Image (cartoon, rainbow, N blue to C red):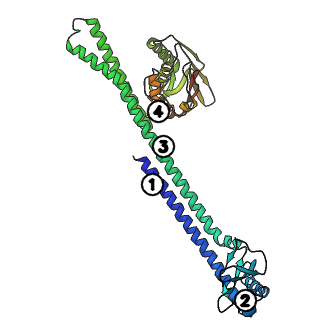
Amino acid sequence: MHTSKYKYVSIVSAVAVLLLLGLYMWMTYRSATKDITERAYSQLNEALSHTNRSEVSLDTVALYVDSLLSTARSNRDVTVQEIDAEGQVLRQNNDRSSSWSLLTKPVSIRRDGSRAIRLALNNPYPELGRRLSPLFLISAIILGFFAIIIIQLLRFITEQEQMAELRNDFSYAMVHDMKSPLSSIIMGAHFLHSGKVDDKPQIKEKYYSIIEEEAEHLLALVNKLLTISKLENKKLILNKWDIHIEPIINDLVEKAKAKATKPIEITTHLEVKNVLADEQYMTEAIANLIDNAIKYSKDEIKIEIKTFDTDKNVLLKVRDNGIGMTKEEQQVIFDKFGRAAIHEKNRKGGVSGFGLGLNYVDQVMQAHGGKVTVSSEKDKYSEFTLYIPKSV
């Protein structure tokens, strides 16, 4: 999707609409001022018809004009001006006119056009305001709606652009992390097929184990992707019942200790030992949190697992002493493509995987009617909390 092109078109459209709306409002304003000055011009003509044009008294003209304006219920704050052929003011009946005054067309009082009378409407803006305020109000409402639409459109385009970038990063990370187990499988199959290890049963068994483990790893990854897709589309049916969580956690702890390549200490404090959940998916969610704690650990791993009771939920906490997260990372850590955005930095720091685990946990908790939250401090700790509802 050419998002930059859509942004450009949206901005150009917004500017065009603003210019058209501004032009329309300006033309309407000019039309209103023209109407006011033309009415004042006709009233000036009427006033001059009752005076001697050869010896015009500005005060007399002002009295006639004031009477006519009063009858027409128009603004009576005017200045009667006598001007020459160049439009220069020769005399006026008061000093209230300014550069903001509206001027009528001049009415000639000499045959040669060397002298003329005109009116300066000193404060026509209240009348203009009464005329134009409904139009300006409607225009402002239309402009407001249009601005909201444009802002939302630009935000949507930006989000789509960011999502496209994240998908690209995610795809790269996924391919990169799948490359290693696939390479191991191909390499193992190649050695087994070559016959070089036929007389070495121990090495042969080692290669079989490598192929089996890496294949299981890839299958687990594919299953996780399929499960997330089903959860997102509300197609996965959970089988929730009262499960005893203590043996599940103990089993996960033993497996984590067996697989750990660093010194590891896992302590548990389970005030609540039964929860209402789907055993398979809840087990996988907890396993992902433990795996995440190990993956982002320092030289020594310390993990603490707790459960305790609240009014509506059972809370399960998994806390580690790992590398922690910034506030920025915490905002996107549960997004499907959140880890991909920071994947390169983490990969260079020795961390593998592309962040499906935490999104999986988030999806599973939403399917259970609960949620998962994180509290973390960079270079100190991370603590994930599962909120498991007590009732359906």
Q: Which of labels 4 and 2 is toward the front?
A: 2
Picture disc at residue 159: 3
Disc 4 marks which residue? 341
Disc 2 marks which residue? 47
Tell me the amino acid under the disc marked 1.
Val
Marks 4/3: CA–CA distance: 14 Å
Tell me the amino acid under the disc marked 4.
Ala
Q: What secondary structure is found at the residue carrying circle 1?
A: helix
Q: For mark 3, does the 10 Å Cα neighbourhood hold few (<14), some (14 to 19), or many (20 or more) residues?
A: few
Q: What secondary structure is found at the residue carrying circle 4?
A: helix
From the top left corner, tell me how far across and down residue 202 is, in percent. Answer: 29, 6
Q: Which of labels 1 and 4 is toward the front?
A: 1
- Among numbered discs 2 and 1, the one appearing first in the sequence: 1
Disc 1 marks which residue? 9
242 to 210, vertically: above or below:
below
Q: Are marks 3 and 1 in contact (CB under 8 Å)?
A: no
Q: What secondary structure is found at the residue carrying circle 2?
A: helix
296 to 3, vertically: above or below:
above
| Residue 139 sits in quarter | bottom right
Q: For mark 4, does the 10 Å Cα neighbourhood hold few (<14), some (14 to 19), or many (20 or more) residues?
A: many
Residue at point 65%, 73% (across, down): 131
Tell me the amino acid under the disc marked 2.
Ala
From the top left corner, tell me how far across and down residue 209 is, in percent. Answer: 32, 13
